[in-house]
């Protein structure tokens, strides 16, 4: 199953590294990353594969949300199907 992870918040050093390490700790494989910084705000959309994940989607979602609170950004992890449905025009 593929998931979409989005991050929005004030830019600071280490956001990408902390997110990548947290995903690696759960054996979630990063497939693609698109990130940018606009007027000091960090924005990332990341696609990952949970096929070999060591935790279920709900736990991964909760861990990533907690990491976001810890580092001061909003992190949202959703299944690709839900993300696509929510952003369909």
Image (cartoon, rainbow, N blue to C red):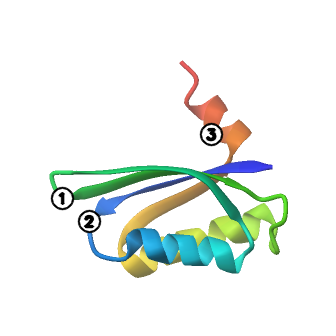
Q: Judge from the rendering whether residue 84 lies leftward or rightward of residue 37; answer left or right.
A: right
Q: Residue at horizontal 54%, vertical 69%?
A: 65
Expressed as whole percent of the image width and height from the top left, the position of residue 36 reads: 32, 50
Q: Quadrant of residue 71?
A: bottom left
Q: For mark 3, what is the residue?
A: 83
| 84, above or below 13, in the image | above
* First reached walking from the N terminus: tag 2 or tag 1: 2
For the residues bearing labels 2 and 1, Cβ distance under 8 angstroms = yes
Q: Earlier in the sequence, mark 2 or mark 3?
A: 2
Mark 1 or mark 3: name the one nearer the start of the chain: 1
Q: Is residue 18 left or right of residue 3?
A: left
- Residue in the image at 73% along x and 71% along y: 59
- Is any atom of residue 63 visible in this view? no
Residue at (43, 62) in percent of width and height: 74
Residue for point 55% across, 71% down:
20
Q: Residue furthest front?
A: 31
Task: Pinpoint residue 2: horizontal percent, then vertical percent.
Answer: 74, 48
Q: Which residue is mark 1?
A: 40
Residue under numbered circle 2? 11
Foreground: disc 1 or disc 3: 1
- Residue at the outermost top position: 89
């Amino acid at each position: 199953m593929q998931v979409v992870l989005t991050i929005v918040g004030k830019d600071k050093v280490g956001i990408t590294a902390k997110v990548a390490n947290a995903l690696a700790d759960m054996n979630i494989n990063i497939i693609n990353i698109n990130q940018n910084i606009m007027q000091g705000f960090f924005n990332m959309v990341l696609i990952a594969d949970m096929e070999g994940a060591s935790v279920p989607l709900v736990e991964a979602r909760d861990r990533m949300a907690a990491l976001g609170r810890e580092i001061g950004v909003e992190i949202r992890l959703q299944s690709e199907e839900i993300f696509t449905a929510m952003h369909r025009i």
